[in-house]
Amino acid sequence: MADLSFRATIKPVEVEELIDLFVHRPLAHLIARAAYPTSITPDQLTLCSMVVGIAAGGCTWSSLARGSAYLAAGGLLLIASAVVDCSDGQLARMRQSSSRFGRMLDGLVDAIVQAAVVPAVVAHLYFEHRTHPATALLWVGIGLVAAVTGVLHTSLYDHFKNVYLFQTQPTRREGNDDPEDVEAQYAGLQSNGLRLFDAIRFFLYRRYVPQQRSLLGWIDPSIPARFRDMPEYSVERAARYRLGHRRVMRAWSFYGIGTHIFGMGIAMITDHIGAYVFARAVLCNLALLLLVPAQRRASREFFARQEMS
């Protein structure tokens, strides 16, 4: 019998974003439990989260003409989209049906929701300061920095999370996709006739995975470039990796997409977008000056020891 408990539907606690763990996922668990005995699929929940996220973008754009109530509605819808987005993975774990296709769709939907909301948030900053053009342009610049580096942040968190799971979990290893594996699956689908929807999924994912590996090679060169080149699971290795990386993994979790969406949603609800964007563009990037060296030290110690053993 499937385990439908909350604990069975989440990732190991040390890689979960705290906002997801205490806000998004408890609510998402209710959705997943309700969907479990029905014909609703995880992909359908993912698409539902996309619709809610696009509605959030529509409200945010409307706030430029209709006021802060629409901005607050956009923030609420944005957080609601994150809750529904969490429910797809939890339903997949209940049914033991997690897949690369689901991860690809999830990443595509995240990108669509960000494209719907983030430009509207930057426009809001401009219109808020439009009586002082220089200040307005400065805020637009800060917003663009926050948007671009935000993609970097979530990509880093996502990869370090997957490495952590690969090294510490004996069976459930989500996201351990090497570029060769993605290309092989893509070629297999092409030979059997590629559907348009699958072509869209692969279009982004086939570019995302290699670029993510390239980025990680620069950020943390001690980690092998491919999962297949990493040491296999053992109880001793898992304990050692967990001991050396638990704290740095918790720090990376604050750079995840769930934390970003919740923070932006609250900023929209309270009409403090500038404070949030400044924190993402400046404070989060300054924190990397401490976090990246800590990550490099932990990886160097673990993987160098592996080479000597």
Image (cartoon, rainbow, N blue to C red):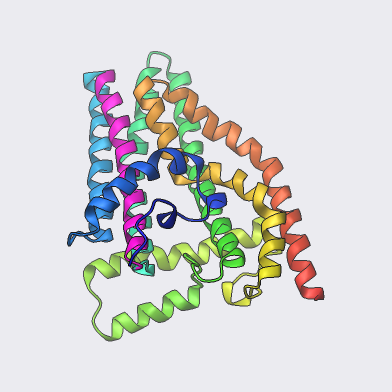
| Residue 246, image x, y percentages | 65, 51
| Residue 18, image x, y percentages | 50, 41
- Residue at horizontal 73 percent and vertical 67 percent from the top: 303
Which secondary structure type mostly characterizes the magenta part of the structure? Answer: helix
| Residue 37, image x, y percentages | 21, 59
Image quarter where the C terminus lies is: bottom right
Q: Which residues are magenta?
A: 68-96
Q: Residue furthest right?
A: 308
Q: Between residue 171 and residue 306, name the one nearer to us.
A: 171
Q: Residue furthest front?
A: 1
Q: Between residue 70 and residue 30, name the one nearer to us.
A: 30
**Residue 295 visible here:** yes
Q: Residue furthest left?
A: 39
**Residue 122 visible here:** no
Q: Quadrant of residue 72?
A: top left
- Residue at horizontal 71 percent and vertical 41 percent from the top: 290
In reply to whether residue 77 is colored magenta, the answer given is: yes
Image quarter where the N terminus lies is: bottom left
Q: Residue furthest top?
A: 131
Q: Quadrant of residue 5?
A: bottom left
| Residue 279, image x, y percentages | 54, 30
For residue 308, side relative to residue 175 (left or right):
right
- Residue at horizontal 49 percent and vertical 67 percent from the top: 172
Q: Is residue 309 shown above or below 166?
A: below
For residue 175, side relative to residue 72 (left or right):
right
- Residue at horizontal 40 percent and vertical 17 percent from the top: 129
Q: Is residue 298 shown above or below 200?
A: above
In reply to whether residue 221 is colored magenta, the answer given is: no
Q: How many marks?
A: 0
